[in-house]
Image (tube, helix red, strand yellow):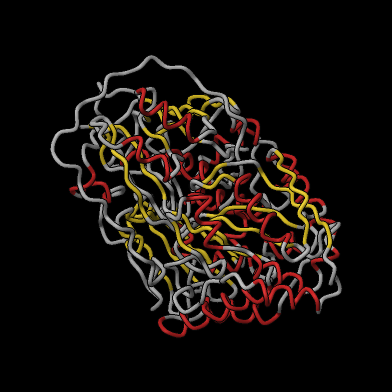
Protein backbone atom coordinates (compact mmCIF):
# COMPACT_ATOMS: atom_id res chain seq x y z
CA UNK A 1 0.00 0.00 0.00
CA UNK A 2 1.12 3.53 -0.36
CA UNK A 3 0.27 6.94 1.03
CA UNK A 4 2.01 9.92 2.47
CA UNK A 5 2.71 11.93 5.58
CA UNK A 6 1.46 14.98 7.38
CA UNK A 7 3.41 17.94 8.76
CA UNK A 8 5.18 17.35 12.05
CA UNK A 9 3.30 18.37 15.15
CA UNK A 10 4.55 16.80 18.34
CA UNK A 11 2.76 16.33 21.64
CA UNK A 12 4.59 16.82 24.92
CA UNK A 13 4.13 14.14 27.57
CA UNK A 14 5.56 13.81 31.02
CA UNK A 15 8.54 11.49 31.04
CA UNK A 16 7.75 8.05 32.40
CA UNK A 17 10.35 5.88 34.14
CA UNK A 18 11.46 2.81 32.20
CA UNK A 19 11.66 -0.68 33.61
CA UNK A 20 15.16 -2.11 33.50
CA UNK A 21 15.78 -4.84 30.97
CA UNK A 22 15.56 -8.21 32.71
CA UNK A 23 17.51 -11.04 31.11
CA UNK A 24 18.91 -11.23 27.62
CA UNK A 25 16.85 -9.80 24.78
CA UNK A 26 15.40 -12.59 22.66
CA UNK A 27 17.10 -13.03 19.31
CA UNK A 28 15.23 -11.51 16.43
CA UNK A 29 13.35 -14.05 14.36
CA UNK A 30 14.03 -13.51 10.66
CA UNK A 31 10.99 -13.03 8.50
CA UNK A 32 10.32 -16.13 6.42
CA UNK A 33 10.59 -15.61 2.69
CA UNK A 34 7.22 -16.12 1.14
CA UNK A 35 7.40 -19.20 -1.05
CA UNK A 36 3.66 -19.62 -1.45
CA UNK A 37 0.46 -17.69 -0.90
CA UNK A 38 -1.25 -18.10 2.46
CA UNK A 39 -4.18 -19.81 0.77
CA UNK A 40 -3.75 -23.33 -0.54
CA UNK A 41 -3.13 -23.49 -4.26
CA UNK A 42 -4.67 -26.96 -4.33
CA UNK A 43 -8.13 -25.49 -4.02
CA UNK A 44 -9.04 -25.90 -0.35
CA UNK A 45 -7.83 -24.35 2.87
CA UNK A 46 -9.23 -24.45 6.36
CA UNK A 47 -8.59 -22.39 9.42
CA UNK A 48 -9.17 -25.33 11.72
CA UNK A 49 -10.31 -24.52 15.23
CA UNK A 50 -7.55 -22.19 16.46
CA UNK A 51 -9.07 -19.36 18.52
CA UNK A 52 -9.01 -15.89 16.97
CA UNK A 53 -5.78 -14.09 17.64
CA UNK A 54 -4.03 -17.28 18.80
CA UNK A 55 -0.85 -16.24 16.97
CA UNK A 56 -0.03 -14.26 20.07
CA UNK A 57 0.18 -17.25 22.37
CA UNK A 58 3.69 -18.29 21.31
CA UNK A 59 6.68 -17.79 23.60
CA UNK A 60 7.53 -14.55 21.82
CA UNK A 61 4.19 -12.99 22.57
CA UNK A 62 4.92 -11.88 26.11
CA UNK A 63 2.05 -10.72 28.27
CA UNK A 64 -1.19 -10.23 26.37
CA UNK A 65 -3.59 -10.10 29.27
CA UNK A 66 -5.90 -7.13 29.49
CA UNK A 67 -3.77 -5.72 32.30
CA UNK A 68 -6.12 -3.26 33.93
CA UNK A 69 -3.21 -1.33 35.48
CA UNK A 70 -1.16 -1.21 32.26
CA UNK A 71 0.00 2.23 31.22
CA UNK A 72 -0.78 4.07 28.02
CA UNK A 73 1.24 3.03 24.97
CA UNK A 74 2.68 5.94 23.01
CA UNK A 75 4.03 5.48 19.49
CA UNK A 76 6.00 8.06 17.49
CA UNK A 77 5.32 7.79 13.77
CA UNK A 78 5.21 9.92 10.66
CA UNK A 79 1.58 9.11 10.02
CA UNK A 80 0.41 8.83 6.44
CA UNK A 81 -3.28 8.97 7.27
CA UNK A 82 -5.62 10.88 5.01
CA UNK A 83 -8.84 9.13 6.06
CA UNK A 84 -10.10 6.74 8.74
CA UNK A 85 -12.87 5.40 6.54
CA UNK A 86 -12.16 1.64 6.53
CA UNK A 87 -13.09 1.21 2.87
CA UNK A 88 -11.32 4.37 1.66
CA UNK A 89 -8.12 4.02 3.70
CA UNK A 90 -4.92 2.85 2.02
CA UNK A 91 -1.59 3.47 3.76
CA UNK A 92 0.94 2.00 6.18
CA UNK A 93 -0.58 3.64 9.26
CA UNK A 94 -4.00 2.66 7.95
CA UNK A 95 -2.97 -0.99 8.26
CA UNK A 96 -2.14 -0.51 11.95
CA UNK A 97 -5.38 1.34 12.65
CA UNK A 98 -7.67 -0.96 10.68
CA UNK A 99 -6.15 -4.13 12.15
CA UNK A 100 -6.73 -2.78 15.66
CA UNK A 101 -10.31 -1.66 15.07
CA UNK A 102 -11.87 -3.65 12.19
CA UNK A 103 -11.25 -7.38 12.23
CA UNK A 104 -10.86 -9.47 9.10
CA UNK A 105 -12.20 -12.98 8.65
CA UNK A 106 -8.69 -14.42 8.39
CA UNK A 107 -5.37 -13.27 9.85
CA UNK A 108 -1.79 -14.36 9.38
CA UNK A 109 0.74 -15.37 11.99
CA UNK A 110 3.23 -12.49 12.36
CA UNK A 111 5.98 -15.06 12.93
CA UNK A 112 5.18 -17.02 9.74
CA UNK A 113 3.36 -15.24 6.91
CA UNK A 114 2.55 -18.60 5.31
CA UNK A 115 0.28 -19.56 8.23
CA UNK A 116 -3.29 -18.29 8.30
CA UNK A 117 -5.18 -17.99 11.59
CA UNK A 118 -8.88 -17.49 12.33
CA UNK A 119 -10.26 -14.12 13.22
CA UNK A 120 -13.96 -13.58 12.57
CA UNK A 121 -14.16 -16.87 10.66
CA UNK A 122 -13.65 -20.22 12.34
CA UNK A 123 -12.93 -22.01 9.04
CA UNK A 124 -12.93 -21.44 5.30
CA UNK A 125 -12.60 -23.33 2.02
CA UNK A 126 -12.27 -22.88 -1.72
CA UNK A 127 -13.60 -25.01 -4.56
CA UNK A 128 -11.25 -26.85 -6.91
CA UNK A 129 -10.89 -24.04 -9.47
CA UNK A 130 -10.70 -21.19 -6.92
CA UNK A 131 -13.86 -19.46 -8.13
CA UNK A 132 -15.95 -19.96 -4.97
CA UNK A 133 -14.92 -19.32 -1.37
CA UNK A 134 -16.94 -20.18 1.74
CA UNK A 135 -16.43 -18.72 5.22
CA UNK A 136 -18.09 -19.76 8.47
CA UNK A 137 -18.25 -16.99 11.07
CA UNK A 138 -17.54 -17.41 14.75
CA UNK A 139 -20.90 -17.27 16.55
CA UNK A 140 -19.23 -15.48 19.48
CA UNK A 141 -18.03 -12.53 17.42
CA UNK A 142 -19.57 -9.19 18.39
CA UNK A 143 -18.93 -5.57 17.53
CA UNK A 144 -17.76 -3.10 20.16
CA UNK A 145 -21.39 -2.16 20.88
CA UNK A 146 -22.21 -5.80 21.67
CA UNK A 147 -24.24 -6.60 18.55
CA UNK A 148 -23.34 -9.80 16.67
CA UNK A 149 -21.10 -9.81 13.61
CA UNK A 150 -23.21 -11.36 10.85
CA UNK A 151 -22.71 -12.43 7.26
CA UNK A 152 -24.74 -9.38 6.21
CA UNK A 153 -22.04 -7.13 7.73
CA UNK A 154 -19.33 -8.97 5.79
CA UNK A 155 -21.28 -8.69 2.53
CA UNK A 156 -21.96 -4.99 3.13
CA UNK A 157 -18.33 -4.21 4.00
CA UNK A 158 -16.86 -6.01 0.99
CA UNK A 159 -19.42 -4.57 -1.42
CA UNK A 160 -18.77 -1.09 -0.08
CA UNK A 161 -15.02 -1.63 -0.58
CA UNK A 162 -15.65 -2.58 -4.21
CA UNK A 163 -18.16 0.19 -4.94
CA UNK A 164 -16.40 3.03 -3.13
CA UNK A 165 -13.78 2.86 -5.93
CA UNK A 166 -10.92 3.72 -3.59
CA UNK A 167 -7.25 2.69 -3.80
CA UNK A 168 -7.90 -0.68 -2.11
CA UNK A 169 -10.98 -1.51 -4.19
CA UNK A 170 -8.83 -3.54 -6.56
CA UNK A 171 -8.70 -6.24 -3.87
CA UNK A 172 -12.32 -7.12 -4.66
CA UNK A 173 -11.82 -7.05 -8.41
CA UNK A 174 -13.53 -9.80 -10.39
CA UNK A 175 -16.11 -10.99 -7.85
CA UNK A 176 -19.61 -11.63 -9.20
CA UNK A 177 -21.60 -12.34 -6.04
CA UNK A 178 -21.49 -12.41 -2.26
CA UNK A 179 -24.16 -14.73 -0.91
CA UNK A 180 -25.28 -15.06 2.71
CA UNK A 181 -27.46 -18.19 3.08
CA UNK A 182 -27.59 -17.61 6.84
CA UNK A 183 -26.19 -15.23 9.44
CA UNK A 184 -22.97 -17.21 9.84
CA UNK A 185 -22.07 -18.14 6.25
CA UNK A 186 -20.49 -16.05 3.50
CA UNK A 187 -19.98 -17.38 -0.04
CA UNK A 188 -17.98 -15.28 -2.52
CA UNK A 189 -18.02 -16.16 -6.22
CA UNK A 190 -15.61 -14.99 -8.91
CA UNK A 191 -16.09 -15.12 -12.65
CA UNK A 192 -12.54 -16.38 -13.13
CA UNK A 193 -10.14 -18.33 -10.90
CA UNK A 194 -8.68 -16.21 -8.12
CA UNK A 195 -6.22 -18.27 -6.09
CA UNK A 196 -5.17 -15.06 -4.30
CA UNK A 197 -8.48 -14.44 -2.56
CA UNK A 198 -7.78 -16.22 0.73
CA UNK A 199 -4.59 -14.18 1.22
CA UNK A 200 -6.57 -11.09 0.20
CA UNK A 201 -9.11 -11.75 2.96
CA UNK A 202 -6.28 -11.28 5.48
CA UNK A 203 -5.61 -7.75 4.17
CA UNK A 204 -6.64 -5.11 6.69
CA UNK A 205 -8.73 -3.35 4.04
CA UNK A 206 -11.23 -6.24 4.13
CA UNK A 207 -12.06 -5.56 7.77
CA UNK A 208 -15.73 -5.83 8.71
CA UNK A 209 -17.85 -2.82 9.67
CA UNK A 210 -21.05 -2.75 11.71
CA UNK A 211 -23.22 -1.96 8.71
CA UNK A 212 -26.34 -0.91 10.60
CA UNK A 213 -24.42 1.66 12.64
CA UNK A 214 -22.44 2.99 9.65
CA UNK A 215 -25.59 3.39 7.56
CA UNK A 216 -27.80 4.87 10.27
CA UNK A 217 -25.32 7.22 11.90
CA UNK A 218 -22.73 7.84 9.19
CA UNK A 219 -24.78 7.73 6.03
CA UNK A 220 -22.54 5.05 4.58
CA UNK A 221 -23.49 3.42 1.29
CA UNK A 222 -22.40 0.01 -0.01
CA UNK A 223 -24.46 -0.24 -3.20
CA UNK A 224 -23.25 0.65 -6.70
CA UNK A 225 -22.80 4.41 -6.85
CA UNK A 226 -21.16 4.52 -3.41
CA UNK A 227 -18.22 6.43 -4.88
CA UNK A 228 -20.46 9.48 -5.22
CA UNK A 229 -23.43 8.71 -2.94
CA UNK A 230 -21.55 7.75 0.23
CA UNK A 231 -21.25 10.52 2.81
CA UNK A 232 -19.62 8.66 5.71
CA UNK A 233 -15.96 9.66 5.43
CA UNK A 234 -16.30 12.61 7.81
CA UNK A 235 -18.22 10.48 10.33
CA UNK A 236 -15.43 7.90 10.38
CA UNK A 237 -12.94 10.59 11.47
CA UNK A 238 -14.52 10.64 14.92
CA UNK A 239 -16.33 7.30 15.12
CA UNK A 240 -15.54 3.64 14.60
CA UNK A 241 -17.82 0.63 14.16
CA UNK A 242 -15.66 -2.47 14.35
CA UNK A 243 -15.20 -5.64 16.38
CA UNK A 244 -11.47 -5.30 17.06
CA UNK A 245 -9.57 -5.07 20.34
CA UNK A 246 -9.48 -1.28 20.07
CA UNK A 247 -11.91 1.48 19.14
CA UNK A 248 -11.29 5.02 17.93
CA UNK A 249 -11.11 7.56 20.76
CA UNK A 250 -10.04 10.64 18.81
CA UNK A 251 -8.11 11.79 15.75
CA UNK A 252 -6.53 15.17 15.09
CA UNK A 253 -4.98 15.56 11.65
CA UNK A 254 -1.26 16.23 11.90
CA UNK A 255 -1.29 15.64 15.64
CA UNK A 256 -2.42 12.30 17.07
CA UNK A 257 -4.52 9.20 16.61
CA UNK A 258 -5.86 7.88 19.94
CA UNK A 259 -7.35 4.42 20.45
CA UNK A 260 -9.08 3.06 23.53
CA UNK A 261 -9.25 -0.59 24.53
CA UNK A 262 -12.49 -2.34 23.59
CA UNK A 263 -13.52 -3.64 27.00
CA UNK A 264 -16.19 -5.79 25.33
CA UNK A 265 -13.74 -7.50 22.99
CA UNK A 266 -14.93 -11.01 22.22
CA UNK A 267 -11.64 -12.61 21.08
CA UNK A 268 -8.96 -14.52 22.96
CA UNK A 269 -6.29 -11.81 22.66
CA UNK A 270 -7.60 -8.61 24.25
CA UNK A 271 -5.48 -5.50 24.24
CA UNK A 272 -2.91 -5.09 27.01
CA UNK A 273 -2.89 -1.29 26.91
CA UNK A 274 -6.00 0.66 27.89
CA UNK A 275 -5.01 3.48 25.56
CA UNK A 276 -2.74 3.80 22.54
CA UNK A 277 -1.66 7.19 21.25
CA UNK A 278 0.06 7.38 17.90
CA UNK A 279 1.60 10.84 17.75
CA UNK A 280 2.72 12.59 14.60
CA UNK A 281 6.50 12.93 14.59
CA UNK A 282 7.84 13.31 11.07
CA UNK A 283 11.54 13.63 11.72
CA UNK A 284 13.43 10.41 12.54
CA UNK A 285 15.86 12.30 14.79
CA UNK A 286 12.96 13.68 16.82
CA UNK A 287 11.55 10.15 17.15
CA UNK A 288 14.94 8.95 18.43
CA UNK A 289 15.20 11.73 20.97
CA UNK A 290 11.69 11.17 22.29
CA UNK A 291 12.35 7.45 22.69
CA UNK A 292 15.58 8.17 24.59
CA UNK A 293 13.76 10.65 26.82
CA UNK A 294 11.05 8.12 27.66
CA UNK A 295 8.34 10.25 26.05
CA UNK A 296 7.35 7.46 23.66
CA UNK A 297 7.42 3.67 23.89
CA UNK A 298 7.96 2.86 20.22
CA UNK A 299 9.70 4.91 17.52
CA UNK A 300 8.73 3.47 14.16
CA UNK A 301 10.94 5.31 11.68
CA UNK A 302 14.40 5.67 13.17
CA UNK A 303 17.15 5.55 10.56
CA UNK A 304 19.64 2.69 10.49
CA UNK A 305 22.64 4.96 10.85
CA UNK A 306 21.20 6.39 14.10
CA UNK A 307 20.97 3.02 15.83
CA UNK A 308 24.43 3.43 17.35
CA UNK A 309 23.04 6.17 19.57
CA UNK A 310 20.81 3.57 21.27
CA UNK A 311 23.58 1.10 22.09
CA UNK A 312 24.13 0.57 25.80
CA UNK A 313 20.78 2.05 26.85
CA UNK A 314 19.22 -0.60 29.13
CA UNK A 315 15.80 0.96 28.72
CA UNK A 316 15.63 0.52 24.93
CA UNK A 317 15.70 -2.46 22.59
CA UNK A 318 16.73 -1.87 18.97
CA UNK A 319 17.37 -4.18 16.04
CA UNK A 320 16.79 -4.48 12.33
CA UNK A 321 14.52 -6.86 10.47
CA UNK A 322 14.25 -7.69 6.77
CA UNK A 323 11.11 -6.40 5.11
CA UNK A 324 9.10 -6.61 1.91
CA UNK A 325 8.74 -2.81 1.84
CA UNK A 326 10.38 -0.74 -0.86
CA UNK A 327 10.75 2.71 -2.35
CA UNK A 328 10.62 3.29 -6.09
CA UNK A 329 10.53 5.93 -8.77
CA UNK A 330 7.87 5.89 -11.46
CA UNK A 331 8.17 7.17 -15.04
CA UNK A 332 4.83 8.12 -16.59
CA UNK A 333 5.01 8.59 -20.38
CA UNK A 334 1.37 9.67 -20.59
CA UNK A 335 1.64 12.46 -18.00
CA UNK A 336 1.40 16.09 -19.04
CA UNK A 337 4.93 17.36 -19.73
CA UNK A 338 6.38 13.85 -20.11
CA UNK A 339 6.97 13.86 -23.86
CA UNK A 340 10.59 12.84 -23.37
CA UNK A 341 9.51 9.69 -21.54
CA UNK A 342 7.36 8.30 -24.36
CA UNK A 343 10.49 6.89 -26.01
CA UNK A 344 11.30 3.57 -24.35
CA UNK A 345 15.00 4.17 -25.07
CA UNK A 346 14.86 7.15 -22.73
CA UNK A 347 13.14 5.25 -19.93
CA UNK A 348 15.62 2.41 -20.26
CA UNK A 349 18.51 4.90 -20.25
CA UNK A 350 17.18 6.47 -17.04
CA UNK A 351 17.03 3.04 -15.43
CA UNK A 352 20.62 2.24 -16.44
CA UNK A 353 21.95 5.64 -15.35
CA UNK A 354 20.96 5.21 -11.72
CA UNK A 355 23.63 4.35 -9.15
CA UNK A 356 21.69 1.78 -7.13
CA UNK A 357 24.49 0.98 -4.71
CA UNK A 358 25.05 4.67 -4.08
CA UNK A 359 21.34 5.22 -3.51
CA UNK A 360 21.34 2.46 -0.89
CA UNK A 361 24.32 4.07 0.80
CA UNK A 362 22.94 7.61 0.97
CA UNK A 363 19.43 6.59 2.02
CA UNK A 364 19.74 3.66 4.43
CA UNK A 365 23.50 3.44 5.00
CA UNK A 366 23.56 0.27 2.91
CA UNK A 367 21.06 -1.54 5.18
CA UNK A 368 18.89 -2.82 2.39
CA UNK A 369 18.82 -4.64 -0.91
CA UNK A 370 18.35 -3.84 -4.56
CA UNK A 371 15.15 -5.16 -6.09
CA UNK A 372 14.54 -6.32 -9.64
CA UNK A 373 10.85 -5.73 -10.29
CA UNK A 374 7.74 -4.44 -8.52
CA UNK A 375 7.40 -7.97 -7.07
CA UNK A 376 9.54 -7.63 -3.94
CA UNK A 377 12.37 -9.85 -2.78
CA UNK A 378 10.96 -12.97 -1.17
CA UNK A 379 7.63 -13.09 -3.00
CA UNK A 380 6.80 -15.65 -5.70
CA UNK A 381 8.29 -14.50 -8.99
CA UNK A 382 11.24 -12.55 -7.58
CA UNK A 383 13.95 -15.17 -7.09
CA UNK A 384 15.09 -15.56 -10.71
CA UNK A 385 15.04 -11.88 -11.69
CA UNK A 386 18.26 -9.85 -11.76
CA UNK A 387 18.28 -6.47 -10.01
CA UNK A 388 19.44 -3.58 -12.22
CA UNK A 389 22.99 -2.28 -12.22
CA UNK A 390 24.30 1.11 -13.28
CA UNK A 391 25.68 1.15 -16.84
CA UNK A 392 26.36 4.72 -17.87
CA UNK A 393 27.99 3.80 -21.17
CA UNK A 394 24.93 1.87 -22.33
CA UNK A 395 22.61 4.58 -20.96
CA UNK A 396 24.38 7.24 -23.05
CA UNK A 397 24.10 5.05 -26.17
CA UNK A 398 20.38 4.67 -25.64
CA UNK A 399 19.94 8.43 -25.21
CA UNK A 400 21.91 9.04 -28.40
CA UNK A 401 19.60 6.67 -30.27
CA UNK A 402 16.44 8.24 -28.79
CA UNK A 403 14.29 11.12 -29.99
CA UNK A 404 16.06 13.31 -27.40
CA UNK A 405 19.80 12.81 -27.96
CA UNK A 406 20.62 16.13 -26.28
CA UNK A 407 18.49 15.36 -23.27
CA UNK A 408 15.64 17.37 -21.78
CA UNK A 409 14.24 18.81 -18.56
CA UNK A 410 11.30 17.17 -16.82
CA UNK A 411 9.26 17.75 -13.66
CA UNK A 412 9.82 15.41 -10.71
CA UNK A 413 7.09 16.03 -8.14
CA UNK A 414 7.16 13.80 -5.09
CA UNK A 415 5.78 13.72 -1.53
CA UNK A 416 8.14 15.05 1.11
CA UNK A 417 8.28 12.10 3.48
CA UNK A 418 10.68 9.89 5.38
CA UNK A 419 9.62 6.27 5.14
CA UNK A 420 11.40 2.95 5.75
CA UNK A 421 14.43 5.03 6.72
CA UNK A 422 14.48 6.74 3.31
CA UNK A 423 14.36 10.52 3.21
CA UNK A 424 12.78 11.33 -0.15
CA UNK A 425 14.58 14.66 -0.49
CA UNK A 426 17.95 12.94 -0.06
CA UNK A 427 17.04 10.15 -2.46
CA UNK A 428 15.68 12.39 -5.18
CA UNK A 429 18.71 14.67 -5.01
CA UNK A 430 20.87 11.60 -5.64
CA UNK A 431 18.62 10.53 -8.55
CA UNK A 432 18.83 14.07 -9.95
CA UNK A 433 22.62 13.94 -9.77
CA UNK A 434 22.77 10.53 -11.49
CA UNK A 435 20.54 11.53 -14.39
CA UNK A 436 22.53 14.65 -15.22
CA UNK A 437 25.15 12.32 -16.68
CA UNK A 438 22.77 11.42 -19.53
CA UNK A 439 21.34 14.90 -20.06
CA UNK A 440 18.06 14.37 -18.19
CA UNK A 441 17.50 17.31 -15.85
CA UNK A 442 15.01 16.73 -13.06
CA UNK A 443 13.17 19.75 -11.68
CA UNK A 444 12.62 18.53 -8.13
CA UNK A 445 9.31 19.58 -6.62
CA UNK A 446 8.68 18.24 -3.11
CA UNK A 447 5.05 18.75 -2.07
CA UNK A 448 2.61 17.74 0.63
CA UNK A 449 0.44 14.73 0.03
CA UNK A 450 -2.85 16.43 -0.99
CA UNK A 451 -1.14 18.31 -3.81
CA UNK A 452 0.64 15.15 -4.97
CA UNK A 453 -2.50 13.01 -5.04
CA UNK A 454 -4.47 15.68 -6.87
CA UNK A 455 -1.78 15.93 -9.53
CA UNK A 456 -1.16 12.19 -10.00
CA UNK A 457 -4.89 11.54 -10.37
CA UNK A 458 -5.66 14.51 -12.60
CA UNK A 459 -2.99 14.53 -15.30
CA UNK A 460 -0.15 12.42 -13.93
CA UNK A 461 3.41 13.30 -12.91
CA UNK A 462 6.32 12.61 -15.31
CA UNK A 463 8.77 11.44 -12.65
CA UNK A 464 7.84 10.74 -9.05
CA UNK A 465 8.90 8.73 -6.02
CA UNK A 466 6.58 6.53 -3.99
CA UNK A 467 6.69 3.59 -1.58
CA UNK A 468 4.85 0.31 -1.12
CA UNK A 469 4.36 -2.42 1.48
CA UNK A 470 2.35 -5.63 1.06
CA UNK A 471 -1.42 -5.56 1.27
CA UNK A 472 -1.43 -9.35 1.57
CA UNK A 473 0.89 -12.26 0.86
CA UNK A 474 0.17 -13.14 -2.80
CA UNK A 475 2.24 -11.76 -5.68
CA UNK A 476 -0.87 -10.89 -7.69
CA UNK A 477 -1.19 -7.57 -5.85
CA UNK A 478 1.97 -6.24 -7.47
CA UNK A 479 0.72 -6.97 -10.97
CA UNK A 480 -2.76 -5.65 -10.21
CA UNK A 481 -1.32 -2.43 -8.79
CA UNK A 482 1.83 -1.80 -10.85
CA UNK A 483 1.34 -3.83 -14.02
CA UNK A 484 0.01 -2.73 -17.40
CA UNK A 485 -3.21 -4.65 -16.76
CA UNK A 486 -6.85 -3.62 -16.76
CA UNK A 487 -7.72 -1.63 -13.64
CA UNK A 488 -4.15 -1.18 -12.41
CA UNK A 489 -3.43 2.07 -10.55
CA UNK A 490 -0.18 2.58 -12.41
CA UNK A 491 -1.62 1.66 -15.79
CA UNK A 492 -3.83 4.71 -15.23
CA UNK A 493 -1.23 6.98 -13.63
CA UNK A 494 1.45 6.22 -16.22
CA UNK A 495 -1.13 6.90 -18.94
CA UNK A 496 -1.75 10.39 -17.64
CA UNK A 497 -4.24 9.95 -14.82
CA UNK A 498 -7.81 11.03 -15.47
CA UNK A 499 -6.58 13.16 -18.38
CA UNK A 500 -5.18 10.18 -20.28
CA UNK A 501 -5.80 6.50 -20.88
CA UNK A 502 -4.56 3.29 -19.33
CA UNK A 503 -1.34 1.78 -20.66
CA UNK A 504 -2.38 -1.83 -21.19
CA UNK A 505 -0.27 -4.85 -22.17
CA UNK A 506 -2.64 -7.67 -23.28
CA UNK A 507 0.12 -10.20 -22.60
CA UNK A 508 0.26 -9.18 -18.94
CA UNK A 509 -3.52 -9.52 -18.68
CA UNK A 510 -3.28 -13.08 -20.00
CA UNK A 511 -0.32 -14.03 -17.81
CA UNK A 512 -2.08 -12.74 -14.69
CA UNK A 513 -5.23 -14.71 -15.47
CA UNK A 514 -3.12 -17.84 -15.89
CA UNK A 515 -1.22 -17.18 -12.64
CA UNK A 516 -4.45 -16.81 -10.66
CA UNK A 517 -5.57 -20.21 -11.97
CA UNK A 518 -2.26 -22.01 -11.33
CA UNK A 519 -0.21 -23.46 -8.50
CA UNK A 520 3.26 -24.73 -7.67
CA UNK A 521 6.08 -24.35 -10.20
CA UNK A 522 3.74 -23.13 -12.93
CA UNK A 523 2.58 -20.26 -10.70
CA UNK A 524 6.18 -19.30 -9.92
CA UNK A 525 7.07 -19.37 -13.63
CA UNK A 526 4.15 -17.13 -14.57
CA UNK A 527 4.86 -14.53 -11.87
CA UNK A 528 8.53 -14.53 -12.91
CA UNK A 529 7.41 -13.74 -16.48
CA UNK A 530 5.14 -11.00 -15.17
CA UNK A 531 7.97 -9.54 -13.11
CA UNK A 532 10.23 -9.47 -16.15
CA UNK A 533 7.49 -7.89 -18.25
CA UNK A 534 7.03 -5.10 -15.70
CA UNK A 535 10.80 -4.59 -15.64
CA UNK A 536 10.86 -4.32 -19.44
CA UNK A 537 8.12 -1.67 -19.38
CA UNK A 538 10.52 0.69 -17.56
CA UNK A 539 7.71 2.44 -15.70
CA UNK A 540 8.28 1.28 -12.11
CA UNK A 541 11.93 1.30 -11.00
CA UNK A 542 12.48 -0.03 -7.43
CA UNK A 543 15.38 1.70 -5.68
CA UNK A 544 15.54 0.56 -2.05
CA UNK A 545 14.26 -2.59 -0.35
CA UNK A 546 15.20 -1.43 3.12
CA UNK A 547 15.57 -3.16 6.43
CA UNK A 548 13.26 -1.88 9.13
CA UNK A 549 14.54 -0.58 12.44
CA UNK A 550 12.61 -1.71 15.48
CA UNK A 551 13.25 0.58 18.45
CA UNK A 552 11.13 0.37 21.57
CA UNK A 553 11.02 0.46 25.35
CA UNK A 554 12.59 -2.60 26.97
CA UNK A 555 9.40 -3.51 28.84
CA UNK A 556 7.41 -3.94 25.62
CA UNK A 557 7.06 -7.57 24.50
CA UNK A 558 6.31 -9.17 21.14
CA UNK A 559 7.44 -6.32 18.93
CA UNK A 560 7.00 -7.59 15.37
CA UNK A 561 6.53 -6.72 11.72
CA UNK A 562 3.47 -8.26 10.09
CA UNK A 563 3.43 -8.91 6.33
CA UNK A 564 -0.27 -8.04 6.14
CA UNK A 565 -0.79 -5.54 8.92
CA UNK A 566 2.45 -3.76 9.76
CA UNK A 567 1.96 -3.87 13.55
CA UNK A 568 -0.85 -5.65 15.41
CA UNK A 569 -1.31 -3.57 18.54
CA UNK A 570 -3.16 -6.19 20.57
CA UNK A 571 -0.25 -8.62 20.22
CA UNK A 572 2.04 -6.22 22.08
CA UNK A 573 2.55 -7.05 25.73
CA UNK A 574 4.15 -5.50 28.81
CA UNK A 575 6.68 -7.08 31.16
Residue drawn where x is 38% and y is 43% of the image: 568
Q: How many marks?
A: 0
Furthest-left residue in this view: 23
Question: Which picture quadrant has residue 212?
Answer: top right
Answer with left or right where residue 227 lies relative to residue 335: left
Furthest-top residue in this view: 14
Where is residue 424 drawn, in percent x and y?
Answer: 61, 46
Residue nearest the observer in this picture, 209 or 323: 323
Residue 203 in sight: yes
Residue drawn where x is 62% and y is 60% of the image: 170
Q: Is residue 110 above or below residue 550?
A: below
Question: Which picture quadrant has residue 339?
Answer: bottom right
Where is residue 256 drawn, in percent x and y?
Answer: 52, 26
Residue 88 in sight: no
Answer with left or right where residue 38 lies relative to residue 469: left
Residue drawn where x is 33% and y is 63% of the image: 32
Where is residue 553 drawn, in percent x and y?
Answer: 30, 32
Q: Is residue 445 above or below residue 124?
A: above
Residue nearest the observer in this picture, 288 or 23: 288
Answer with left or right where residue 69 lies relative to residue 302: left
Residue drawn where x is 54% and y is 58% of the image: 358
Residue nearest the observer in this picture, 468 or 154: 468
Q: Is residue 268 above or below residue 329?
A: above
Q: Is residue 424 above or below residue 475?
A: above
Where is residue 469 drawn, in percent x and y?
Answer: 51, 54
Residue nearest the observer in this picture, 189 or 573: 573
Image quadrant in which the C terminus is located: top left
Amino acid sequence: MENFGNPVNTIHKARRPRRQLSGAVAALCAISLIAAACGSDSGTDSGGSTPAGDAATSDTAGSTSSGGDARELIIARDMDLQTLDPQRAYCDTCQIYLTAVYETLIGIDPNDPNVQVPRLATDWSANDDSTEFTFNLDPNAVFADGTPVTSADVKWSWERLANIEGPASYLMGGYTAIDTPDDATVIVTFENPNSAFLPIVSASYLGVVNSKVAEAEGGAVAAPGAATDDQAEQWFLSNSAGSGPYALASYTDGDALVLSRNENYWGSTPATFPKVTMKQVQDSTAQLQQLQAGDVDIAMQISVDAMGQLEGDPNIVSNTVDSYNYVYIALSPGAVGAEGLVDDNVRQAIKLALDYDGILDVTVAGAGQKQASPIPNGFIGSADLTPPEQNLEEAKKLMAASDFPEGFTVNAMYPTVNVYGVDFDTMMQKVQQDLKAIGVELELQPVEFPQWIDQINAEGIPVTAVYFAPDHTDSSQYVQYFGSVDGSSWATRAGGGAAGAQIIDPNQNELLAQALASSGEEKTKLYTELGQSMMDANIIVPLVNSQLVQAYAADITNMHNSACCNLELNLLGLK
